[in-house]
Image (cartoon, grey):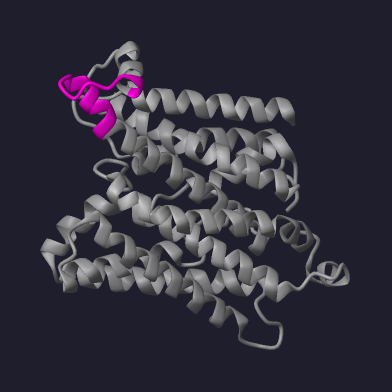
Amino acid sequence: MVAGLLVAVLLLALAIAASLAIGTRDVSLVTVIDALFRPDPAVTDHVVVRDLRIPRTVVGLLAGLALGLAGALMQGVTRNPLADPGLLGVNAGASLFVVAGIAWFGVTSALGYVWFAFAGAAVAAVVVYVIGSLGREGATPVKLALAGTALTAALTSLITIVLLSNSEAFDRYRFWAAGSLVARGLDSTLPLVPFIAIGVVLAVAAARMLNALALGDDLARGLGQNLVTARIVCAVAIVLLCGSATAMAGPIVFVGLAVPHLARWFTGPDYRLILLFSAILGPTLLLAADVVGRVIGRPGEIEAGLVVAFLGAPVLIALVRRAKPAGL
């Protein structure tokens, strides 16, 4: 496990270095190091590194961390290995509120999107939990997943209706929805750091609860686990993490699905370790996808949200073919 952790940290360090050094403008590694430690505002390459690539890398780190943890929490709390941030309607709720902000409130800045996306993610999660809690059995994993799927379908239809009736909103929404790390400045990113920090703390606190939930509801109750408390803690953490990541970089999919499976390849079924590795592998995958998008899209670039699935899918398929995913 220690060797696996070192490998994961090394991969993350390489992804950060590549994100700072590789782009549409050729900048040498020596110049990047000078820009980091001896910045000169008169040197254009230093300005590119400090004003464009550092914020972009920070956004990738935070969004990848949040999506990786959110995916692991979702798969654990629903006991569904196919769960990702879209399953509980979080992405759809965030997207609908952003579309409403663009179309009806004239929101045009990334900082404005942040609060609409966050509110939408929170509202969608609450609605899914309330619907999934109806009935004598309470909020079971199957009912939560069905409620999330149904809500996602309904919200997606509403988004389509709004966009088809407002071409200006559609033009602005399609860039955000592509899932990109471009033009996400630190001014719109730093206000979200406290929310991500709280989400990380809740995720760490939920690790032992997820290990109990993986044994099934009856055994978890027998071990003294309060299932309602466990699911509420996980739901709040998911909203904070996924809502913040979606607000930063748009509704990026696949990171939350693939990263926990990659983490299990190193750790096995212990959620204390799965969460740790997901927090490292999430930003690694997202930054790697962003760098690949810059290279293959030259002289322009392809958004990370479009590349990440092509990059991670072969790895995920190889892992699934090699061995069955560890038990949840």
Q: Looking at the image, which residue is at 36% across and 50% down?
A: 190
Is 326 magenta? The answer is no
Residues 185 and 264: in front is 185
Q: Looking at the image, which residue is at 49% across and 34% down?
A: 284
Rendered location of residue 156, percent (x, y): 34, 68
Above or below, 31 against 193 in this view is: above
Assign the magenta stretch its main secondary structure.
helix
Q: Looking at the image, which residue is at 37% across and 65% down?
A: 94
Above or below, 282 against 140 in this view is: above
Residues 309 and 301: in front is 301
Q: Looking at the image, which residue is at 30% across and 24% down?
A: 295
Q: Do we see residue 71 in this rendering?
A: yes
Which quadrant of the view contains residue 54? top left
Q: What is the span of residues highlighted in magenta in the rendered image?
A: 36-51
Q: Quadrant of the N terminus?
A: top right
Rendered location of residue 249, percent (x, y): 34, 49
Is 49 magenta? The answer is yes
Which quadrant of the view contains residue 16? top left
Residues 15 and 260: in front is 15
Q: Residue furthest right?
A: 222
Rendered location of residue 30, percent (x, y): 33, 11
Q: Do we see residue 141 in this rendering?
A: no
